[in-house]
């Protein structure tokens, strides 16, 4: 279904109005609906639609939720502590500024990634010598983001420096590859192998602690 | 005198009727630098200078000479040649910041510096040998890994500026010659079908049915959640099916329109042999007809080593002008192209009279 206003985008909102038993149905895309919403209420938009306060009410609550889910306003000015990339710029251009952006914007990376890729966890080659970055936000996304914006010492920065001082790739990647093998073994229902791998991972963790 | 070097596209190869070339590209970024979007000019220069030092290292390891340069300092013509031979990507070609390149002598391995990502390793070969290029790219990657600190995360793999590359950073692509599938109008449905498997197909020169020369590039869209070998396997499976379909359709097409196709093929040969001016699009389309005619056994070039895909590459404008030896500065590219094709097009064995 195509939007009745722009005749270009796919319609996601269907508005049915019944006046004196006469039913009319209109379809809008997100963008046009948002545009109408910004013109409502009171001021009727230039369009010939009988946009009453009911529609504007429905749309505004829908759009609020919609906007919130996509580009949280509170997060708009979040900035990556390492490179200074703004969250809003990232959302617009879909390009990250530096490796630490993955951690700084972790709350949306996962979602964005799902939109363009089937999986979200690396399953390929592991480098020997690389700098391992922490890309998952350990605290709740909001506090990490606040930290990124107001006080770069907390949260975000900590992650960045944890990356910089960098543990050696060897150990970490070993563990990651073992985990992957473990998942694989479970999938194939090879529980003997899975148990062995689990023990190995445990060993490795203990070794790390001891070090 | 300069030694004549055989480039990858000049190499004699096992002729494949559908697969023209294979290419592997790995996107890598270094720790300690921002990604392209947030990289300052001075940092960019530092990055380029730093990575270019790798030339010595790879020369030593591979025991072969490599060529290295600041792409941003080359003349537009030089850059165009690199673009046409696939040594650099359009990203690198159009970037104004400092960009660099390390290129093997036969141009089969290129390391692009500061394009969309800090480093992009590309390996290419004529014909169908994905395993060879994959191994080549992987070896260069290991060497770079030992010399530089890649940005990597256990969860997301190799970190890249675009989420479309993150994970393996691997894009494997096949260049395919698809005259029958394109002409039968099935390319659109093939495209939709492939999209479901996370595979993209796109015209090499222009989009969709309009790609002159019927050349299409097929590559993986997925880069994360799959291992490198899984990506290669799925592509190989799909490509072999497309190749079978293409060949089958060529034969069926010929069965149905025998005289029409024969006329088209010979007509194309005639034009290529005697035309005095050919624009790129025409030349590509006509050469494609010859290639099709050759496959169907309609015409047979007297020179068995005649390689149409190589000729298609050599008539690209910048390569053509660079290779042309002419004193006439006024001569147009189209005239040069026609002359070049006249010279290179082999005689054909006389057809059987019917």
Image: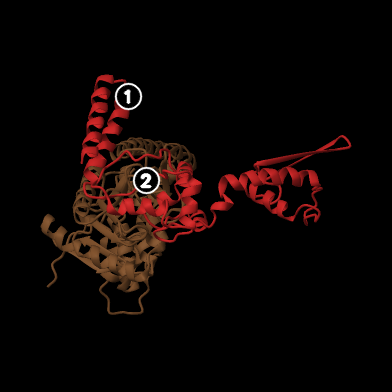
Indicate the secondary structure of the residue bearing disc 1: helix
Palette colour of chain B: brown
Q: Which mark is residue B219?
A: 2
Give the labeled residue for mark 1: A186
Q: Is residue B222 above or below residue B339?
A: above
Q: Position of residue A177 (x, y in %)?
A: 27, 36
Palette colour of chain A: red
Q: Position of residue B21 (x, y in %)?
A: 29, 49
The image quadrant of residue B97 is: bottom left
Q: CA distance from mark 2 to mark 1?
A: 31 Å
Mark 1 Cα-neighbour bin, 10 Å: few <14, some 14–19, many ≥20 = some
The image quadrant of residue B51 is: bottom left
Q: Position of residue B176 (x, y in %)?
A: 35, 46
Q: Is residue A82 above or below residue B231?
A: below
Indicate the secondary structure of the residue bearing disc 2: strand
Chain of the residue that carries numbered disc 2 in the rendered image: B
Residue A168 falls left or right of residue B157: left
Cβ–Cβ below 8 Å for labels 2 and 1? Answer: no
Of discs 2 and 1, which sits in the foreground?
A: 1
Mark 2 Cα-neighbour bin, 10 Å: few <14, some 14–19, many ≥20 = many
């Amino acid at each position: 279904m195509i939007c009745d206003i722009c005749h270009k985008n796919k319609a996601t909102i269907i508005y049915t109005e019944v006046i004196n038993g006469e039913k009319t149905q209109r379809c809008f895309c997100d963008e046009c609906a948002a545009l109408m919403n910004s013109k409502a209420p009171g001021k009727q938009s230039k369009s010939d639609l009988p946009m009453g306060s009911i529609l504007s009410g429905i749309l505004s609550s829908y759009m609020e939720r919609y906007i919130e889910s996509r580009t949280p306003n509170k997060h708009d000015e979040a900035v990556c502590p390492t490179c200074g990339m703004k969250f809003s710029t990232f959302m617009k251009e879909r390009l990250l500024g530096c490796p630490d952006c993955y951690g700084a914007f972790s709350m949306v990376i996962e979602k964005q990634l799902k939109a363009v890729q089937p999986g979200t966890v690396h399953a390929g080659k592991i480098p020997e010598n690389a700098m391992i970055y922490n890309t998952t936000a350990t605290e709740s996304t909001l506090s990490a983001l606040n930290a990124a914006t107001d006080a770069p010492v907390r949260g975000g920065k900590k992650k960045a420096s944890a990356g910089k001082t960098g543990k050696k790739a060897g150990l970490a990647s070993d563990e990651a590859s073992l985990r992957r093998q473990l998942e694989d073994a479970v999938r194939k229902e090879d529980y003997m192998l899975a148990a062995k791998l689990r023990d190995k991972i445990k060993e490795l963790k203990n070794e790390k602690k001891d070090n | 005198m300069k030694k004549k070097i055989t480039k990858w596209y000049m190499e004699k190869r096992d002729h494949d009727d559908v697969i023209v070339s294979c290419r592997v590209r790995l996107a890598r970024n270094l720790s300690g630098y921002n990604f392209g979007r947030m990289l300052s000019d001075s940092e960019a220069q530092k990055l380029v200078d730093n990575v270019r030092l790798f030339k010595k290292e790879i020369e030593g390891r591979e025991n072969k000479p490599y060529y290295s340069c600041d792409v941003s300092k080359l003349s537009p013509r030089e850059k165009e040649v690199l673009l046409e031979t696939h040594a650099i990507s359009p990203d690198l070609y159009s970037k104004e910041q400092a960009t660099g390149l390390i290129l093997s002598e036969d141009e089969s391995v290129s390391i692009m510096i500061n394009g969309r990502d800090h480093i992009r390793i590309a390996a290419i070969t004529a014909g169908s040998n994905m395993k060879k290029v994959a191994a080549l790219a992987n070896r260069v990657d290991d060497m770079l890994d030992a010399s530089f600190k890649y940005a990597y995360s256990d969860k997301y793999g190799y970190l890249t500026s675009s989420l479309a590359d993150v994970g393996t950073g691997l894009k494997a692509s096949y260049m395919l010659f698809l005259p029958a599938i394109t002409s039968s109008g099935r390319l659109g449905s093939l495209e939709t079908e492939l999209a479901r498997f996370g595979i993209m197909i796109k015209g090499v020169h222009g989009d969709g049915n309009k790609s002159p020369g019927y050349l299409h590039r097929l590559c993986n869209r997925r880069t994360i959640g799959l291992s490198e070998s899984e990506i290669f396997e799925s592509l190989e499976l799909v490509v072999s099916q497309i190749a079978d379909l293409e060949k089958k359709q060529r034969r069926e097409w010929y069965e149905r329109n025998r005289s029409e196709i024969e006329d088209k093929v010979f007509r194309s040969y005639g034009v290529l042999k005697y035309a005095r001016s050919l624009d790129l699009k025409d030349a590509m389309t006509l050469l494609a007809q010859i290639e099709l005619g050759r496959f169907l056994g309609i015409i047979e070039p007297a020179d068995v080593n005649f390689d149409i895909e190589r000729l298609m590459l050599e008539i690209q404008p910048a390569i053509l002008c660079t290779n042309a030896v002419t004193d006439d500065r006024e001569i147009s590219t189209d005239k040069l192209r026609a002359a070049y094709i006249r010279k290179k097009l082999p005689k054909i064995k006389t057809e059987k009279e019917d």
